[in-house]
Amino acid sequence: MKVLIAQPIPTAGIDLLKRHYDVLESDHVLGREELITAIGDKDALVCAMHKIDAEVINAGKNLKIISKLAVGYDDIDIKFAGERGIMVTNAPGVLTQTVSELVFAHILALARRLPEADHYVRAGNFKQWSFDLMVGGEIKGKTLGIIGFGAIGQRLVPMAKGFGLKVVYSNQQGEIPEFENDADVKYATKDELLKVADFVVLLVSLTVETKHLITARELALMKTTAFLINLARGPVVNEADLVRALQDKTIAGAGLDVFEFEPNVSAELLAMPNTILTPHIGSATVEARAELSLKAARNVVDTLEGRGCENIVNREYLRTE
């Protein structure tokens, strides 16, 4: 059987696939037309950053599995793939620690004004210490609001407690029984959370329901001293509304690892000193990327060898003939 790896990935997954199959690995991120050409006779596609729509799927005449090196899969037409009898898999659980750490990197950097301070020094403005120079705020005693309380959101709880933060969460599934008796972790509606949180962290999947989950209305509910942090997907936030909220000082600042029109970023955001902007690096650790590669490869092997795969995300659409 033949496997196409559509961009460079860590060697752990490549080595596993090569022990079983004929593997074509690209030394660059394949462009759309290159992908359509290369996928023609392949049984499996391993990808991370491509839009896999009906045209691409139809080009894969022998395709049996699309293995995504990520948790999110909103860039794959999972319904159409299922109707073609093609499994789509993801790699859950790999990024829990890595993304959680980046959340706190954003929180701490915003609270202590690290980007501003770094720029201040590099610009040659640091002439002497003064009592009011770059004064930020402590996070101890503050409230962390988590919208989307899955594995990553729940991993934030012990980290938050370590920093002395209280946690309030909003979840589509409602209250999580495991935290019912935890005095430092409370369930709330989205609006209730927005009103009390000092740091609002977005960790939801991108769906029809969550697109523009945060608009001018939601931002107006937040404290003027609060920060919004988005490590979910860019379109979860109406970026134009966020720009206005920051300009009007409706909220204090924002940390964004994703953007509504990614990779394009609003010029206004780029100019704001109270924002931290990172280039979609939630999974960007050596450890996480290696494990993503390996899990994506295992998904392929399990599927093609008929062992069954627990990470199928389009099971409800799969044609079973």
Image: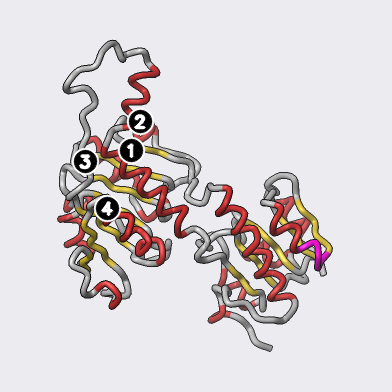
Eye-nearest disc, 1 or 3: 3
Residue shown at 74% from the left, 75% from the top:
304
Residue identified by numbered label 2:
115
- Answer with the quarter of the image where residue 77 lies: bottom right
Span of residues in magenta: 17-21
Disc 1/disc 3 C-alpha distance (Å): 11 Å
Say what amino acid the circle numbered 4 marks. Answer: Val
Image height of 143 relative to 57, above or below: above
| Image x and y of residue 274, in percent | 29, 34
Residue shown at 69% from the left, 81% from the top:
307
Residue identified by numbered label 3:
138
Query: Which comes before the other along the chain, label 2 or label 1?
Result: 1
Instruction: Locate residue 316 relative to residue 220 in the image: left or right.
Output: right
Say what amino acid the circle numbered 2 marks. Answer: Pro
Query: Which comes before the other along the chain, label 1 or label 3?
Result: 1
Query: Which comes before the other along the chain, label 4 or label 3?
Result: 3
Disc 2/disc 1 C-alpha distance (Å): 7 Å
From the image, which quarter does the C terminus lie in? bottom right
Residue 211 visible from this viewpoint: no
Residue identified by numbered label 1:
109
Could you classify mark 4 by the number of other residues whose Cα lies within 10 Å: few (under 14), some (14-19), or many (20 or more)? many
Eye-nearest disc, 4 or 1: 1
SS of the residue under disc 3: loop
Disc 4/disc 1 C-alpha distance (Å): 14 Å
Residue identified by numbered label 4:
200
- Answer with the quarter of the image where residue 56 lies: bottom right
Say what amino acid the circle numbered 1 marks. Answer: Ala
